[in-house]
Amino acid sequence: MKQVLHPANERGAANHGWLNSKHSFSFANYYNPEKMNFGLLRVLNDDIVAPGKGFGKHPHENMEIISIPLNGDLEHEDSMGNKAIIKEGEIQAMSAGTGIFHSEYNASQTDEVKFLQIWIFPREKDVTPRYDQILLPDLSKTNTLHQVLSPNPNDDGIWVHQDTWFNLGTYDTGKAAEYSIQKSGNGVYAFIIDGSFEIEGHKLGQRDAIGLWETNKIDFKSLEAGSRLLLIDVPMNFS
Protein backbone atom coordinates (compact mmCIF):
# COMPACT_ATOMS: atom_id res chain seq x y z
CA MET A 1 0.00 0.00 0.00
CA LYS A 2 1.21 3.46 -0.88
CA GLN A 3 0.16 6.54 1.07
CA VAL A 4 0.30 10.33 0.95
CA LEU A 5 -0.71 12.60 3.83
CA HIS A 6 -2.27 16.03 3.27
CA PRO A 7 -2.58 17.89 6.60
CA ALA A 8 -5.28 20.57 6.65
CA ASN A 9 -2.83 23.31 7.58
CA GLU A 10 -0.71 22.62 4.51
CA ARG A 11 -3.48 23.28 2.00
CA GLY A 12 -3.40 26.26 -0.28
CA ALA A 13 -5.43 29.25 0.88
CA ALA A 14 -7.19 32.14 -0.81
CA ASN A 15 -9.25 34.75 1.04
CA HIS A 16 -10.99 37.22 -1.26
CA GLY A 17 -13.25 38.64 1.43
CA TRP A 18 -16.42 37.21 -0.08
CA LEU A 19 -14.72 33.82 -0.56
CA ASN A 20 -12.49 31.94 1.85
CA SER A 21 -11.18 28.85 0.07
CA LYS A 22 -8.77 26.08 0.99
CA HIS A 23 -7.24 24.03 -1.84
CA SER A 24 -6.16 20.41 -1.39
CA PHE A 25 -4.53 20.55 -4.83
CA SER A 26 -2.95 23.25 -7.01
CA PHE A 27 -5.67 25.68 -8.06
CA ALA A 28 -5.80 29.27 -9.34
CA ASN A 29 -2.93 31.19 -7.69
CA TYR A 30 -1.94 28.25 -5.47
CA TYR A 31 0.67 26.06 -7.13
CA ASN A 32 2.46 23.13 -5.53
CA PRO A 33 4.06 20.67 -7.98
CA GLU A 34 3.70 17.90 -5.38
CA LYS A 35 -0.06 18.52 -5.08
CA MET A 36 -1.37 18.57 -8.62
CA ASN A 37 -3.89 15.76 -8.19
CA PHE A 38 -4.57 12.38 -6.63
CA GLY A 39 -5.01 10.07 -9.58
CA LEU A 40 -7.89 11.53 -11.60
CA LEU A 41 -9.07 13.65 -8.65
CA ARG A 42 -7.95 17.10 -9.79
CA VAL A 43 -9.60 19.60 -7.40
CA LEU A 44 -10.96 19.49 -3.87
CA ASN A 45 -11.78 23.00 -2.70
CA ASP A 46 -13.23 23.70 0.74
CA ASP A 47 -15.18 26.93 0.16
CA ILE A 48 -16.95 29.43 2.43
CA VAL A 49 -18.96 32.06 0.55
CA ALA A 50 -20.30 35.23 2.18
CA PRO A 51 -24.06 35.99 2.15
CA GLY A 52 -25.32 37.03 -1.26
CA LYS A 53 -21.93 36.54 -2.92
CA GLY A 54 -20.61 33.93 -5.30
CA PHE A 55 -18.93 32.87 -8.50
CA GLY A 56 -20.18 34.77 -11.55
CA LYS A 57 -20.88 33.01 -14.84
CA HIS A 58 -17.71 31.30 -16.10
CA PRO A 59 -16.85 28.44 -18.50
CA HIS A 60 -15.67 24.85 -18.04
CA GLU A 61 -15.09 21.96 -20.39
CA ASN A 62 -14.13 18.27 -20.14
CA MET A 63 -14.41 17.98 -16.37
CA GLU A 64 -16.82 16.27 -13.97
CA ILE A 65 -17.68 18.90 -11.33
CA ILE A 66 -19.31 17.90 -8.06
CA SER A 67 -20.60 20.21 -5.31
CA ILE A 68 -21.49 19.01 -1.81
CA PRO A 69 -23.01 21.67 0.49
CA LEU A 70 -21.96 21.25 4.13
CA ASN A 71 -23.95 24.19 5.54
CA GLY A 72 -26.35 26.57 3.85
CA ASP A 73 -27.85 26.86 0.37
CA LEU A 74 -26.05 27.22 -2.96
CA GLU A 75 -27.80 28.77 -5.96
CA HIS A 76 -26.85 27.36 -9.38
CA GLU A 77 -27.54 28.66 -12.88
CA ASP A 78 -26.06 27.46 -16.18
CA SER A 79 -26.13 27.88 -19.96
CA MET A 80 -28.34 24.78 -20.33
CA GLY A 81 -31.18 26.63 -18.65
CA ASN A 82 -30.88 24.98 -15.25
CA LYS A 83 -31.56 27.09 -12.18
CA ALA A 84 -31.67 25.43 -8.79
CA ILE A 85 -30.91 25.67 -5.08
CA ILE A 86 -28.62 22.96 -3.69
CA LYS A 87 -29.00 22.43 0.05
CA GLU A 88 -27.15 20.54 2.77
CA GLY A 89 -28.03 16.87 2.31
CA GLU A 90 -28.00 17.15 -1.48
CA ILE A 91 -25.27 16.67 -4.09
CA GLN A 92 -24.81 18.31 -7.48
CA ALA A 93 -22.95 16.93 -10.49
CA MET A 94 -22.19 18.71 -13.73
CA SER A 95 -20.50 17.17 -16.78
CA ALA A 96 -18.85 20.10 -18.54
CA GLY A 97 -18.08 18.02 -21.64
CA THR A 98 -17.98 20.09 -24.82
CA GLY A 99 -18.42 23.28 -22.79
CA ILE A 100 -20.74 24.96 -20.33
CA PHE A 101 -21.11 28.28 -18.53
CA HIS A 102 -22.38 28.35 -14.96
CA SER A 103 -22.57 30.47 -11.82
CA GLU A 104 -22.79 29.49 -8.16
CA TYR A 105 -24.01 31.96 -5.50
CA ASN A 106 -24.85 31.87 -1.83
CA ALA A 107 -28.65 31.81 -1.86
CA SER A 108 -28.84 33.45 1.58
CA GLN A 109 -28.48 37.17 2.28
CA THR A 110 -27.70 36.53 5.96
CA ASP A 111 -25.74 33.27 6.36
CA GLU A 112 -22.55 31.83 4.91
CA VAL A 113 -22.65 28.78 2.68
CA LYS A 114 -19.96 26.12 3.08
CA PHE A 115 -19.42 23.52 0.39
CA LEU A 116 -16.91 21.17 -1.18
CA GLN A 117 -16.18 21.67 -4.88
CA ILE A 118 -14.59 18.61 -6.48
CA TRP A 119 -13.30 18.10 -10.01
CA ILE A 120 -12.72 14.68 -11.56
CA PHE A 121 -11.12 14.11 -14.96
CA PRO A 122 -13.74 12.37 -17.17
CA ARG A 123 -13.42 8.96 -18.77
CA GLU A 124 -13.95 10.48 -22.20
CA LYS A 125 -13.75 13.98 -23.62
CA ASP A 126 -16.39 16.07 -25.37
CA VAL A 127 -19.47 14.39 -23.93
CA THR A 128 -22.77 16.25 -24.08
CA PRO A 129 -22.94 18.61 -21.10
CA ARG A 130 -25.37 17.58 -18.37
CA TYR A 131 -26.55 18.74 -14.96
CA ASP A 132 -28.10 16.83 -12.11
CA GLN A 133 -28.75 17.14 -8.40
CA ILE A 134 -30.37 14.77 -5.93
CA LEU A 135 -31.42 14.62 -2.32
CA LEU A 136 -29.26 12.13 -0.46
CA PRO A 137 -31.42 9.81 1.66
CA ASP A 138 -30.53 8.43 5.09
CA LEU A 139 -27.38 10.50 5.69
CA SER A 140 -28.54 10.92 9.28
CA LYS A 141 -28.06 7.18 9.83
CA THR A 142 -24.72 6.89 11.63
CA ASN A 143 -21.98 4.27 11.59
CA THR A 144 -22.45 3.36 7.95
CA LEU A 145 -21.08 4.52 4.63
CA HIS A 146 -23.58 6.05 2.22
CA GLN A 147 -22.71 5.86 -1.46
CA VAL A 148 -23.52 9.29 -2.91
CA LEU A 149 -21.87 9.08 -6.35
CA SER A 150 -20.90 6.38 -8.84
CA PRO A 151 -20.40 5.81 -12.59
CA ASN A 152 -23.74 4.02 -12.88
CA PRO A 153 -27.00 5.98 -13.41
CA ASN A 154 -28.94 3.10 -11.83
CA ASP A 155 -26.76 2.96 -8.71
CA ASP A 156 -27.18 4.74 -5.39
CA GLY A 157 -26.42 8.45 -5.54
CA ILE A 158 -25.65 10.72 -8.46
CA TRP A 159 -23.54 9.63 -11.45
CA VAL A 160 -20.61 10.98 -13.48
CA HIS A 161 -18.56 9.99 -16.54
CA GLN A 162 -15.77 8.28 -14.60
CA ASP A 163 -15.16 5.08 -12.64
CA THR A 164 -15.29 6.89 -9.31
CA TRP A 165 -17.37 6.30 -6.19
CA PHE A 166 -17.99 8.78 -3.36
CA ASN A 167 -19.09 7.67 0.12
CA LEU A 168 -20.05 9.81 3.12
CA GLY A 169 -20.28 8.56 6.69
CA THR A 170 -20.78 9.90 10.22
CA TYR A 171 -19.50 7.74 13.08
CA ASP A 172 -19.69 7.44 16.86
CA THR A 173 -16.62 7.26 19.08
CA GLY A 174 -14.62 4.08 18.61
CA LYS A 175 -16.60 2.75 15.66
CA ALA A 176 -14.36 0.89 13.21
CA ALA A 177 -15.12 0.04 9.60
CA GLU A 178 -13.58 -1.22 6.39
CA TYR A 179 -13.95 0.10 2.87
CA SER A 180 -13.32 -2.11 -0.16
CA ILE A 181 -12.04 -0.34 -3.27
CA GLN A 182 -14.53 -0.69 -6.10
CA LYS A 183 -12.24 -1.16 -9.08
CA SER A 184 -8.76 -2.59 -9.52
CA GLY A 185 -6.25 0.20 -10.03
CA ASN A 186 -8.26 2.75 -8.09
CA GLY A 187 -7.08 4.51 -4.95
CA VAL A 188 -8.99 6.22 -2.14
CA TYR A 189 -8.68 9.83 -1.02
CA ALA A 190 -10.09 10.10 2.52
CA PHE A 191 -11.06 13.64 3.55
CA ILE A 192 -12.07 14.30 7.17
CA ILE A 193 -14.99 16.72 7.21
CA ASP A 194 -15.57 16.80 11.00
CA GLY A 195 -14.03 15.21 14.08
CA SER A 196 -11.16 12.78 13.81
CA PHE A 197 -10.34 9.31 12.53
CA GLU A 198 -7.54 6.81 12.60
CA ILE A 199 -6.90 5.54 9.08
CA GLU A 200 -4.28 2.87 8.45
CA GLY A 201 -2.42 3.90 11.62
CA HIS A 202 -2.57 7.68 11.00
CA LYS A 203 -4.56 9.97 13.30
CA LEU A 204 -6.32 12.60 11.21
CA GLY A 205 -8.29 15.63 12.35
CA GLN A 206 -10.80 17.97 10.75
CA ARG A 207 -10.00 18.68 7.08
CA ASP A 208 -6.90 16.45 7.11
CA ALA A 209 -6.72 13.95 4.26
CA ILE A 210 -4.86 10.81 3.25
CA GLY A 211 -4.54 9.17 -0.14
CA LEU A 212 -4.06 5.40 -0.33
CA TRP A 213 -3.45 3.20 -3.36
CA GLU A 214 -2.09 -0.17 -4.44
CA THR A 215 -4.43 -1.84 -1.95
CA ASN A 216 -7.83 -3.54 -2.06
CA LYS A 217 -9.27 -2.00 1.10
CA ILE A 218 -8.73 0.53 3.85
CA ASP A 219 -9.52 0.36 7.57
CA PHE A 220 -10.65 3.35 9.61
CA LYS A 221 -11.91 4.14 13.12
CA SER A 222 -13.72 7.17 14.48
CA LEU A 223 -11.97 8.83 17.42
CA GLU A 224 -14.84 11.06 18.56
CA ALA A 225 -18.60 11.29 18.31
CA GLY A 226 -19.98 12.90 15.18
CA SER A 227 -16.85 12.36 13.11
CA ARG A 228 -17.65 12.63 9.40
CA LEU A 229 -15.57 11.67 6.37
CA LEU A 230 -15.72 11.59 2.60
CA LEU A 231 -14.12 8.71 0.72
CA ILE A 232 -13.29 9.34 -2.95
CA ASP A 233 -12.56 6.09 -4.78
CA VAL A 234 -10.91 7.16 -8.03
CA PRO A 235 -8.73 5.76 -10.84
CA MET A 236 -5.04 6.48 -10.35
CA ASN A 237 -4.37 6.63 -14.11
CA PHE A 238 -6.22 7.14 -17.36
CA SER A 239 -7.13 3.71 -18.74
Image (cartoon, helix red, strand yellow):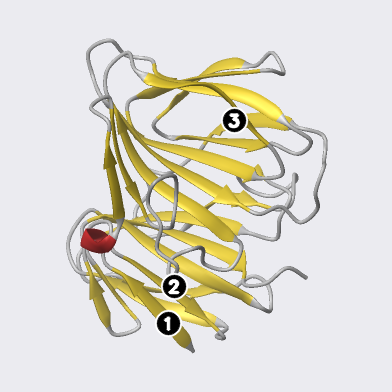
Question: In the picture shown, does residue 34 fall above or below 111?
Answer: below
- Residue 138 appears at what percent x and percent y? 45, 42
Q: Secondary structure at mark 1?
A: strand
Q: Are marks 1 and 2 in contact (CB under 8 Å)?
A: yes
Alpha-carbon span between mark 1 and mark 2: 6 Å
Q: Secondary structure at mark 3?
A: strand
Q: Residues within 10 Å of mark 2 (few under 14, many from 20)?
A: some
Comes first in the chain, label 2 or label 3:
3
- Residue identifier under label 1: 3
- Name which quarter of the figure residue 17 lies in: top left
**Amino acid type indicated by mark 1:** Gln
Question: In the picture shown, does residue 121 fall above or below 16?
Answer: below
- Residue identifier under label 2: 211
- Name which quarter of the figure residue 127 lies in: top right
Question: In the picture shown, does residue 90 fall above or below 202?
Answer: above
Q: Which mark is residue 133?
A: 3
**Amino acid type indicated by mark 3:** Gln
Please tell me whether mark 3 or mark 1 is closer to you in this view: 1
Q: Residue at x 56, y 65 (%)?
A: 233
Q: Secondary structure at mark 2?
A: strand
Q: Which mark is residue 123?
A: none
Alpha-carbon span between mark 2 and mark 3: 27 Å
Alpha-carbon span between mark 3 and mark 1: 32 Å
Comes first in the chain, label 3 or label 1:
1
